[in-house]
Structure formats: C-alpha cells, structure tokens
Amino acid sequence: MNNYLSDTTAIKGLSTADVDTLQQRFGKNIFTQHQKGHLWAILKNIVTEPMFLLLLFAAGLYFLLNSITEGMMMLTAILFVSAISFYQEMKSEHALEALKQYTAPLTTVIRDGKEITIATTELVPGDILLLHEGDMVPTDALILSDNDLSVNDSVITGESFPVEKQAGDKTPLYQGSTINSGACTAVVTYTGNNTTLGKLGNAIASTPDEKTALQRQTQVFVKQLAFFGIAGFAVVFTVNFIRSGNWTASLLLGLTLAMAAIPEEIPVSFSSFMALGAYYMSRMGIIPRQAQIVENLGAANVLCLDKTGTLTENKMKVVMLYDHINGQLYDLDENDTPGNNHLLYIATLASERHPFDNMECAIMESFLRDNKQHIVLPDMIHEYPLEGKPPMMTHVYPQGETILAASKGAVERILRVCHVDQPTREKITAYADNMGKKGFRVLGVASAIIKNNIMPATQDDADWQLEGLIALYDPPRASAAGVISKLYDAGIRVMLLTGDHLSTATYIAARVGILGCRQGITGDEVMQMDEKTLQRTVKEEALYIRMYPEAKQKVIEALKAGGYTVAMTGDGVNDGPALKASHIGIAMGKKGTEIARQAADLVITDDNLAMIPVAIEQGRRIYSNLKKAIRYIISIHIPIILVATIPLLLGWRYPNIFTPIHVIFLELIMGPTCSLFYEKEPVEDTIMQMPPRQKTSSLFSKKELLISMVQGLVITAGVLALYSIYMPEHSLEKTRTFVFTTLIVSNISLTFANRSFTKNFTKTIRYHNPLTPLIIGLSVLFLVVIQLTPGIRQAFGLTAMNIREYGICLATGFISVAWFEIYKRYLPAE
C-alpha cells in the first residue's frame, strides 16, 4: 500500500486539507487522453467547411479581378460567418461539458469523520469509499471491511461471473468493476490514468458513438442538396462562359449558386439543437447521458415500467404476517403481534444484518419493534445468495449444538423446497393471493436444521420447514395514475414488467390505470416462447410478472423487433441489461443503483415519475423545432437558387442578379435564424396530444416536403414577378435592390410563418421566444443600414428606394408567405 495511505483511518477518513494536497499531487479522477485542444479542433472544422472554402475562393477571385472593395467585403463576411459558427460550436461544446458535470457519477466517502456524497472525479488516493450492491467501483481500492461481498470484474478480467472478495485479499477492487452483492468499505489506492483500467486505456467514455438515424437522415439530405448545388454550379459556369468567354467572372457567378445551394446551416443546427436541448433538460432534473438521445424521445411509443420505486414510492412496510406454525394471521395495521414473533425472527435472519434494500430494511424495523425480549441476532457463518427462478436466499447461523438455516423468497419457491402437501399448498397460495390482491408484496419464509453440520451443496437441498408468509406494502405514487393517463393521451402504450406475484402486479396496474393487463405472462413463459410468438404476445399483453433480467431483455428485444421505439425504466442491478437494450433507458437518480444509472440513457434526478412525460414532451419539442428549422432552410434556399438560375437560362436582360456578396449576407441572416431562433421556440400546446412520430428512412414525409417546396416556389414567383416588371425600364442596381429587399422581407415573414405548420399567426405571435425582437430588429437594421449608408449601398450594388417602392417590396414579400396562413386556417394539416 502506498505511504500516503498511512494516516487514513476507516473512522475519520481524510481531512479537507489532505484532500486539497492530494488533488494537487494526483489531479482529478479522470481518464485523460492525449488530444489536441478543443479550440483548435473547432477552428479546424470551420476552415475546412465547404462554405468557408467557397467564400475564400470567391474572395481570391475578386482580388484577381482587381475588385478590391468586393474582396474586402468577402473577407469581412468570412469573419462574420466564422465568428457565428465558432460561437455556435462553442455554445454546443459548453452545453456538452455542462452535461458531463450533470451526468458525472456520485459516490459516498468518509471525510473529516462524516459520510458525504461527492462526484467520483473528486476522489483522491486515501479516500474511504462506502460501496453497496449496484455501485460501480470508481477507483482502484483495497477492501478494509466487507459484508457478503461479491464483485463483477469483467471490465478487467473478461469473466462475466461475479467473484467473492473480502478484506485482506491481495486482489484489489478495480475501477469499472461493479458490486454484485453485499457491501464494503475500501480505501482508494489509485485514481485516473494510474488505475488498472486507466493503464489499459479502456475508458468507457472514449468509445465513439455510432451515428443516430436522424444524423444519417440529415447527412443524406445535406448531400442531396450539395449535389444539386454542384450541378447548378456547372450549369451557371458553363452558360456564362459560353456567352462571355470570361472564365474568372463565370467561375464567380457559378460559385454564387453553389454558395446558395449548400445548406451548411443544417449540420450546425443539428448539433446545436441536440446539445442545448439536452443541457436545458438536465437543468430540469432530466439528465440525458448523451445529447443525441433526445432524438428517440419524440419517437417513443412504448414505455415498460418497473413497479418498485417507479410506480410505487419505494417506502416498504411490513403490514401482514401469516404464521404457519400457529395458524395465526396478523394484520399489523390493526394490531401488533404479541411480541417475539418467531416468523419475524426467521425473516430477519434471512436478511442482511445491515440492510440497504428497502424490503429488508422494513423487515428489520418490524423485528426491532416486535423484539420485546431484546434477542441478540447471532453471527452468520454461511450464505447462499439470492438465486433461482423464482428466487430465494438463505443465511446460516450457529444454534447451540446445531446449525440453523433461515430462508426467504418467492412463495412458489418456498413451497416447492418445503415439499408441502397439496391442501397446505392450496391454503398458503390462497393466503398469498388475498394479500397480493391488496397490493402487498408477499414473501415465503422457511427454516431448516442442518444435520451433521454439513452444508448442503445448494440451498434447495436443506430439510426446509415452512414458517409462513410476510406481506409488505409499497404504496403507489400519488402522481402515478395522472402520469399514465398523460402517456396514453400522447399515444404511448404502457407495460408493466415486474418480479412480483400476479395478484400484486394486477392490483398495482389497476390502481394506476395501466390498460391491456389480461392474464399476465411470467418470465419463464417469456423465455419458453419463440420469437414470433413473443412478438405477437407483446402486442396484446401489457402485464409481465415474475420477471428476471433475461426475460425483461427478451421482451424489450421482441418489442424492438416489432417496430416499436421502446423506453424502459429501472433502478436495480438486474435492470441494467434491459435498460441497455431499450432505445431509451430511464433510471431513477436517488434510489437507483449506479449500475442502472450508467446503463440508462436518461436519469431522473428526483425519482419523480411525472418527469417521464415531461422528458418525452421536451424530446418532441426539440425534434419538432429542428424540423421547422430545416424546412425553413429548404423554403428560403429555393428562391435564392432559382432567382440565380432562371433569368440566366431564360436569357433575361440581367441574367446574374446576385453576386457572392449578396448570397453570403443572406446566409448571415438565415444561419442564426434557424439554429438560434427555432431552438428557442416553446412547446406547442398540442404536442402531447399527437401520436409519436414514426421512425422512417426519410426525414420528412412527402406532404411536409411538398409544402416546404411550395412555400419556396411561391416566394420565388413573387420575387421573379418584381424582377420581370422592373427589369425592362430600370437599371441592374435598381432591379437588384427590389429583388434583394423582397427576399429579406420574405425571409422575415417565413421565419414567423414556420413557427407552426398547423397554428395560425394570431396564435403563434403569442409564443414566447426571447429572440423574436432580436431577429426582427437585426433584419430591419440590416435593411436600414444598407439603404442609408451610401458606401455600403454602393458596395452591394444597390440604389436608394422611396417609401412607395419599399411598400411594394414589403407587400410582395409578405403576400408571398401570407397565403400559408390562410392554408393553415382553412386547410389544417391532419
């Protein structure tokens, strides 16, 4: 052991001063990879973007043509565009870094003689860890004391089976291992890169994530538009070169179209929406462990709930006993037992001496209240851990000249190992069913005398005698029924996957309003079904009982194979595989185990079930707003592209109305609009009355794409109408001023029209978006500055306009978009 551990004691732990010194020496408990700085990476991404390269090339061509003013304006535009991109990237980076702070796992340590909870990143060598079942080991450590400890070291050894460990072992606890059962106190030996896991370089966080479906759809869409831009560039360059023979000017005009067609705003919008959306959710107490998970939230159409701690309060209390030895039934809500109840004594012996499970805590509390003679519990000499289907567990104790075994577990298993006769089985089963119908969790309790002091090979082999039944009540959450109702309103099917008995699960399901609970399917029945049978079953049955990890995971996989987008809640060690298998794993932050939190995609910090529909609502909002932004990009790019090509192809008097300067300044308006304005849009009030979105191979439906294209074409028609009217009798500069101004007005109008594709402007104008005045103000300021500043107006190749001409541009731009408001009013989308 390292010498800096010598002053550590298991009672007091490190002092605050020690921690500061050790952290300066050893740093944070973080796996650090050698990588280039984020700033340089962001700058590299910006300068290698196609739009940046096109702008730089266009600026070079201007200087080559001796158009110094235009060249300087392009360089200025490059700085503006790069600054906006840099700001958006940094904002997303900061949001993701903040998200890491929210998702950092916590651990309990002893410092200054007190138990405190800290982020695992703050651990230093010498810290005293308190680890329990379900915790992930945050550092390398040596065990100081243990209680029935077993650990899964598969992250290091590759062996999936847990191994028993105890104080004094030469083998340490490894960072990344999980406490499979029991508890221990351990002292930290190595942190960060100095741990065994760190030296292997197997940091889980360093594993690259696969691209999500939405990312792939967005990339395909961007590539399609980029291909269109390349084709348009070739056409414009070729036609201009044939007519003029000037390759430099033709190249510049071709670049104008390419810049108009490349939708560089879409990738920026995607990363910004996901990162900022995830960060805002984390501030609400809904922590996405990865930003991209918000994509799946809007598509979730099945929610699989665990009962204990999710639908219920996870506050257990022993409420009823059936003592089989004397045939007495005790209702503890009405009367206490006479005292020193043997059934409670055996149930307590079958539990951990220092329980951390709520059920065992309730049993211990009930025993202590009943222990009138202050019986001292003996020291355990052997343990058979919880196992089997359905499960049971056994603790073994010395009892005079003999050995006593105490067991508790599922009623069916206890009756089986006790080999009771049929009348007794029917009688006990009836008692258990009646208790279950009241919502009680029922355990069977048995005892055995170990003959000849020879431990049986398995716990089933002991000579068991039935002691009776113990019933515990964990009341449903007060909010559960309302939450389930909201989920049904949102088109989300709810299923219950629990380890409880049929009658208990049926009672809870009825209390909270879960529909479709027909007969209940057991975990064993699930495992016996073939894939097709199970896929049919999960479409019809909502109640699954006596479930264990493999069965839960198989149900999740069957739902996924049936085309469902599955969310799953869980908080226990055994929920990890199902949480990982689901599209959206949801763990409870307070009472959930660290394994469940690490396996989950979302963590609800206050264990509030009501946050699940809130999370789904936020996921739908983010996805909806992202689609609004992209549809806005489609609609506004169409007139820019067509106004740059149609006059050229038709041989109009002014075939090339735009230069790269005009396009890039239009982009300066459009970029912040789609990635900042739409990201701030609030939730539409009907979003949770709509069905979940369908996961398809296409980002938009044909109808959605058609509407956005028609919006762009109508704006094009309005702009080209002014173009054709003013072109014969006015100069190029005058015509360009009409076209450019009308496009900006259309852009502002489109921004507000696309805030909703179903609600009218009279409704959406009341949506609270803090950027609304900023977007309007900057657009108006841009127009005013261009018109009132002769130098800038001349650089843009524009002329002054009178009030009447401004009115024509305003009316044309507004009418080109306003038709959509009439469409929404009289022909609402389905």
Image (cartoon, helix red, strand yellow):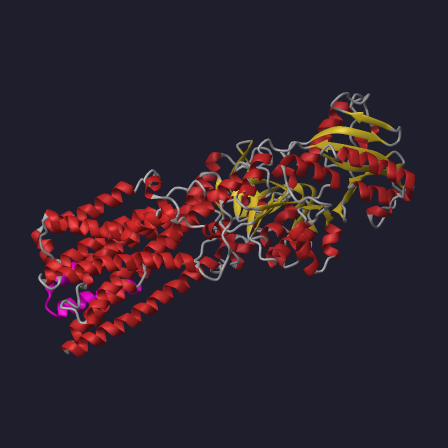
- Residue 391 in picture, x, y percent from top left: 76, 45
- Residue 692 in picture, x, y percent from top left: 51, 49
| Viewer can see residue 515 | yes
Q: Main secondary structure of the magenta part?
A: helix
- Residue 386 in picture, x, y percent from top left: 74, 45
Magenta span has 362?
no
Q: Is residue 452 left or right of residue 157?
A: right
Taking the spot 55% from the left edge, 55% from the top edge, the residue there is: 197
Question: In which quarter of the view is residue 348 placed?
Answer: top right
Q: Is residue 663 left or right of residue 486?
A: left
Magenta span has 70?
yes
- Residue 269 in picture, x, y percent from top left: 36, 53
11 or 645: nearer the viewer:
645
- Give the magenta part as a residue range: 47-76
Query: In the rendered picture of this protein, how many numbered marks are placed on residues?
Result: 0
In this picture, is 38 found above or below 653? above
Q: Is residue 298 left or right of residue 242?
A: right
Taking the spot 70% from the left edge, 36% from the top edge, the residue there is: 507
95 or 216: nearer the viewer:
216
| Viewer can see residue 8 | no
In this picture, is 53 found above or below 349? below
Question: In which quarter of the view is residue 589 placed?
Answer: top right
